[in-house]
Amino acid sequence: MSENNLIVSEEKNNNLFNRAIKNFQNVIFLSNKSFKSIAVRIKRRNIIREYEKYMNIGKYANAIKRENIEKKYTISYNAYLKALNEYIVGNIYPRVMENKGTYDENKLIQEYLKIAELKDIDYMEYKYIRQKFLLNRDLYNVLPMENLYLLEIYKRFYIEKMDEIYKTIIKTYSIKLMQNNNDNEMYDKIYTQIEEYITNILPYKIELDIENKKEYKSIIEESKKLEKYKYEANNINRIKYIEKNLILLSISREIFVYSLPLVAAEQCYIKLLKEARELIVNAQDFNKQNEAYKLLISLIESYNIHLLSKKVYWEDTRIREEYNKFWKEYQRISKLENIDYDEYQRQRDSLFIYYDLKLLNRVRTNKYEPIKEFYRRKLKELQGLRKIKNKYILLKRCV
């Protein structure tokens, strides 16, 4: 009778204590049966719940209600990050220090310590790099989630947060670059963040934004070009390295318009142009020089299409007028592409070289003399490749 009474009691009394026991049983399977693991799961569920409300914030006309939702969402997000951080510090770090950690755990702690070093150097960079690291780490625990509805909400939360984080990081780097355009490390950091975003975040964003998928068409096509540079582009093969960064820059003009300001993007293009010119001058053989020359033409074209053509403010009005003439000529030449490709290519290359040579002539230094000499030879070569028009005149036959 006591057993029967107990069973009846359990079925009827779905009180707070019983629900707490059930929740405890749901999370007890986590690694090491750690309370820090349990805390991560609880905080994760909280952020999903609060983000779901935040997604529907537009429904509420009451400003105080909206403010409370935003406040609770921010508090839940900070608590979630804190739980993730405590799990790494309290669970994984001690195991690594005792040489009991796995290969992945050792690698994770190395990355964590590297990020921690930024705290005293640049707190803003540390703050957002750390958030990105923690969210990335927990994503792999979320993806196997059985509840597809909660998974969908978490993905939307993850994409929105990561989108905000990447844009803030790139903006931070852009400001530093504008302050010091000779900081080579900052250029690499910008390219790394753009590539990470395209590889890790953009696919999820496109997947969730099905209605506007057509808007991503050009970005998807450009991003596919990055595949061939996956194992080739490095500091040893400078041509491949510059080619890859050129693709990243062109995509960034679509995604990071405000995070990577025009001034910073222009500095990136100018640096790549300088490197391409140096590759032409220092090439050991004709093939390498020709490869570097084709890269330079692609750079000049991308620089003009994706950046200068959209530039609004010009410090020198004369340079702006010169560019307008150049742009009109380029548009005229572009019409030849589907009519006579060889002639289009000849005229386009001549225009680009002549325009770049004109820019270099403004600089009062002899360091550009080798590339200027190459340009002069190339212009003569291109002028000599003009097609002879197929004309004929009928002459009267002399008797």
Image (cartoon, rainbow, N blue to C red):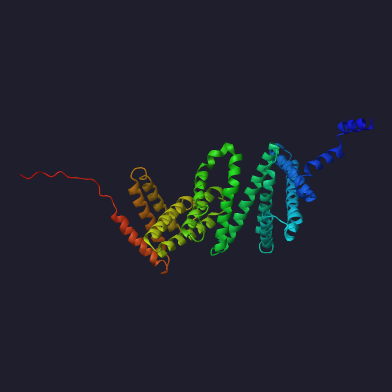
* Residue at the right extreme, as displayed: 1
The quadrant of the rendering that contains the N terminus is top right
Name which quarter of the figure residue 288 lies in. bottom left
- Please say if 169 is above or below 215: below
Q: Quadrant of residue 144?
A: top right
- Residue at image location 88% in from the left, 33% down from the top: 10
Position of 28 with respect to 333 (left or right) is: right
Question: Which residue is depicted at the point 36% across and 48% down?
Answer: 333
| Spot occupied by residue 121 in the image (x, y as percentages of width and height) | 66, 64
Residue 315 seen from this side: no
| Residue 245 visible in the snapshot | yes
Q: Quadrant of residue 155?
A: top right
Residue at horizontal 53%, vertical 65%? 182
Mark count: 0
Question: In the displayed structure, does residue 232 sit left or right of residue 71?
Answer: left
Q: Residue lying at the far left in this picture: please name it.
A: 399
Residue 369 picture location, percent across and down:
39, 67
Q: At which x and y percent is residue 326? A: 39, 53
147 over 266 or under it: above or below: above
Viewer-side residue, 191 vs 87: 87
- Identify which residue is drawn at 59% across, 59% down: 175
Relative image position of residue 47 (x, y in whole percent): 73, 44
Quarter of the figure that contains the C terminus = top left
Q: For this rendering, which residue is in front, 189 or 97? A: 97
Q: Is residue 173 left or right of residue 41?
A: left
